[in-house]
Image (cartoon, helix red, strand yellow):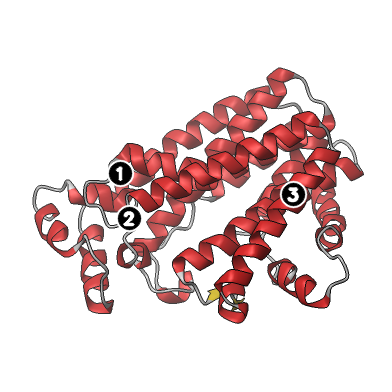
Amino acid sequence: MNPLERLQLAPVESDLLRLESLLAECVVIGDPYLDSVTTHLIYAGGKRLRPMLAIASATLVAREATQDDLLGGVALELLHLASLYHDDVMDEAEVRRNVDSVNARHGNLVAIVAGDYLMARSASIASDLGVEMAGLIARTLAWLTRGQISEVRTAFSIERTEADYYEAIEGKTASLMSSSCRVGAITAKHGPKETEALAEFGRCFGMVYQLRDDVLDVIATENQLGKPAGQDLAEGIYNLPTLFALRDPLIGDELRGILGEALNDAEREHARKLVVATDGVDQTLLAAKTFLATAEKVLVDVPGVQLREGFASLIESLLEDLPSY
């Protein structure tokens, strides 16, 4: 998915080019070693979904983004990047965005401290933008932490519930998307009705985004994913397709007998095929469509026909062109 192509909003694309240089400027302090670590993933690129949502929400495509609009997007992206540094330590990941992860290159301690530094810069930028923005970044960080703890608490648990799953993805993924839209509303000083509509769209977008990601984890190929298919199964992160599969009257018991501990490659692939053999993927896609419907409903309260159509196209694209299974 190319988000800018689906959004089809040229002004946002040009604003994102301005934001790109600002990202690095906001973390570089002149220490060659620290600067190389903290800008590592910035220079590795990325979709910049969160600042894109922030800028689009702020400008409503009717004007060029202000410096505050851009800085709001930077604050959210730095918070997101910080979470990736920490995630890679926890997952013992060696690659991120097709480059060495920071922990693989510099060690876990440096990666953790660098992630903390990015969080501090995010908070500092937010505080310069005002009390409301500072409070939003603090609440978003709390949601991120809550989601991560929920995921860790239920790792390798075949008793993980749908409520556990949704708590984790709302914290780890949807909260940042929702806050991105709210950031744009704050810097643009939109009214309460428009602000809440944008924030709810962002939340629903984040939920659909993660549900899609979890479907792809079990139906896509290694070449499509850039990692082994079924990796969540191997790491004990039982996503929604797996939770549905565990309840399957024919396959659930066999799957339950495999899960609950780390899996080797053969066990991972067997477990993945069991999940795909149930209606777990179909039920997950149905769940995603409920969030899609909610997103399209709240877009009615978002000003600007272009933005409404762009946001609708963006979220709809998440459930299009999925691999056959």
Which residue is painted at 74% across and 36% down in the image?
134
Q: Which amino acid does label 1 sit on?
A: Gln
For marks 3 and 1, give the CA distance.
37 Å
Residue beneath disc 3: 122
**Label whose residue precedes the other's in the sequence (2 or 1):** 2
Determine if residue 129 is in view: yes
Q: What element carries label 1?
A: helix
Say the numbered circle drawn on residue 283: 1
Q: Which of 266 and 106 is in front in this view?
A: 106
Residue 262 relative to residue 232: left or right: left
Label 2: element kind? loop
Q: In which quarter of the image is residue 105?
A: bottom right
The mark closer to the camera, 3 or 1, is 3
Mark seen at residue 155: 2
Instruction: Name which residue lies at 38% across and 45% down.
Output: 285
Q: In which quarter of the image is the C terminus?
A: bottom left
Q: Which amino acid does label 3 sit on?
A: Ser
Earlier residue among tags 2 and 3: 3
